[in-house]
Image: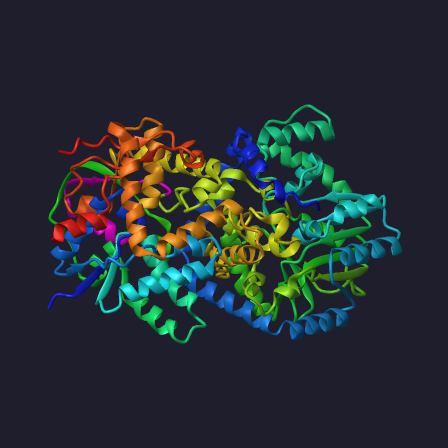
Amino acid sequence: MSPRVGLFATCLMNLFRPNVGFAAVKLLEDAGCSVEVPLAQTCCGQPGYNAGDFDAARALAKQVIAAFEGFDYVVGPSGSCMATIRHDYPKLFADDADWRPRAEALAARSFELLSFLADVRGVRAVAADYAGTVTYHDSCSGLRELGVKAQPRLLLGSVGGLKLAEMSDTEVCCGFGGSFCVSYPEISGRMADDKLACVAATGADTLLGGDLGCLLHLAGRLKRCGSPVKVFHTAEVLAGMADGAGIGDQQEVQK
Amino acid sequence: MKVGSPRFKEKTLVALADPNLRQALGQSRKGFVNGRAALVAGVPEFEAMRDQARDVKNHVLANLDHYLERFEASVTAAGGHVHWAADAEDARRIVLDICQRVDAKVVTKGKSMVSEEIGLNEALEEQGYTVVETDLGEYIIQLAHEPPSHIIAPAIHKTKAQVAELFEAAHGGPRKTTVGELVTEARLVLREKYFQADVGITGGNYLVAETGSSIIVTNEGNGDLTQTLARVHIVTSGIERIVPTLDDVALFLRILARSATGQETETYTTLSTGPRRPGDVDGPEEYHVVLVDNGRSKMLGGKFQDMLRCIRCGACMNHCPVYGAVGGHAYGWVYPGPMGAVLTPLFVGLDATRDLPNACTLNGRCQSVCPVRIPLPELLRELRHRQHEQGLRPPGQTRAIGAWRFVAERPRLYQFANRMAARVLKKMGGSAGRIANLPGGAAWSGLRDLPAPQGQTFLELWQARRK
């Protein structure tokens, strides 16, 4: 029987880039999962958690825990949000006898999209083509908290026509950092420029990553500087759904 | 030392505009980072060593009273003296008393971050002592009248040309052009000072409870000359730097140099155990250890105890992209980078250091290289939590989080707000697909366009598709 997967529709994906959500659905269905999207979900609570407002984080965490109980797995196209659910929820409820077991149960079933596909579902290849040279930015939460490193490279390696050109310092933060990017915009901008210099040095025409926060920030800086480099979420390329406008690029007129 | 942390933002803007800083920081940090990576790759047991180092430190912290008493007994048995300093003022007074009693004129210093923490140089100079820093980096910043900007490379922010200029002004010309010439010149100048020194002050990387030894590691040998040629050797060190035995020291020596400078071992590792004994050919007549608390014991048993494991290697700042962008002086006190962003608020107070826990993306690279596995991002988040509880967060951000919570706790309202935002932002992006000037959002759009949304939210498209 195919596992029931609840898709965690991250705030930024829901608002800015639904295409990433549909790409995630396609990849999950191709991997034999039946996908559902609970409509009672909102945000994982990370903004409150990282702003030191642990009560706000707990309030939203409870909502997520309740919305996703009963699924075999909870999967989201973000290392950042899924690391919050996997690692921070159990900590937030460490002293709560009622909620801690529920938080731990959810944490154990929650995965970032690509690591779920590769590590849990054993996906080794996808059926997609992308004509271009891409470089992949390792977003920090996915990389360091969830071990997302080999999985995107493995899957990108199976995309027809795609060439991966690794950048130097690919594990260095891009400077997004949630509210950091607007609290310290000048530092954030310098970090983005350092990262984008590494991107440019590869000669890649496309920048990929697994977290929309980083991608909106980097795409925004690239476009401000007039760069033609296209930016997509890795899932869009893997699902063969990167044929439209890149993030921050001119969008086709909708009919 | 005066706390400059309230001016963090202003200092970061100055730093970001300084091309010399960018050049100096970029080169040195790359060397440290690449050096560490190459060496760690060659030591398969490195991760196990990090676990072991963490465990030894945790054991010491859980039994700190025992090991401190043991250390004191061992030092006393070796003919030395241990002094307990509750705070910075206490520590300064202890050192000044010793200097006065032995009628000192010239004081040489090996590198000691604790001496920076307690403001020792200023206190000594105020009393008329000639103070000479003998670590090359410390000597450079002493000439420049600046505080250190890195805990193991205090002058990392200086370029070669800037150092040459400082040396020319201090020593007379002609101006030197190569690193070799500059180092030779510093050596010649400093050499005389070692022989003039009445008191030599060093830090202590490790204080060994078993033997009563203090240990320093240096690359220049300046620490050895400081502590053996002066009549009196004073060690200033934090109470948390205790290790139980010399065997434990061996473990820490293996991880320290690799983590710090990307070396297998530092050039000099020097043990001091008591003063010169009858028959010894050299060594000081007196040996003193000033054990500084200055806020450390308050961290025991609480959420920040993990920070007391710190062995002051600097790996966290070497790998921190924020430190890499703004350098150490922006942090405004003795300890910069991730470890400083945790320690400074704890030592000087949350109010004067509001930016420090927040000027971090929580990217976790510091934690991933910390040799004693200090969960730095978690500690920074805990400091933000304390700020939140004490009303020390930026008011605008607190209001924004409050509004966000209100909406996000109501899924229907949340989805409605998102549908509106998707439409409005899409329209604002127009045919360009991005917004160059976000009203009220200059903090974003000053440097970046905002990529426009696709126009409808995922959840509404999903519902439409399911119908």
Give residue B178's position: percent from left, percent from top.
58, 30
Give residue B367's position: percent from left, percent from top.
46, 56
Position of the C terminus of chain A, as image quadrant, is top left
Residue B255 vs residue B180, the one in the foreground? B255
Position of the N terminus of chain A, as image quadrant, is bottom left
Give residue A72's position: percent from left, percent from top.
21, 67
**Which range of residues does the magenta coloring cover?**
A147-169
Residue B231 vs residue B316, the one in the foreground? B316
At 71% across and 46% down in the image, what residue appears? B1
At 66% across and 70% down in the image, what residue appears? B209
Is residue B210 visible in the rendered image? The answer is no
Q: In screen coordinates, is B283 left or right of A12?
A: right
Q: In screen coordinates, is B389 left or right of B122?
A: left
Is residue B387 visible in the rendered image? The answer is yes
At 83% across and 44% down in the image, what residue appears? B126
Please tell me whether residue B150 is drawn above or below residue A246 in the rendered image: below
Q: Is residue B380 magenta?
A: no
Q: Is residue A156 magenta?
A: yes
Counting labels gives: 0
Residue A175 vs residue A43, the one in the foreground? A43
Give residue B273's position: percent from left, percent from top.
71, 64
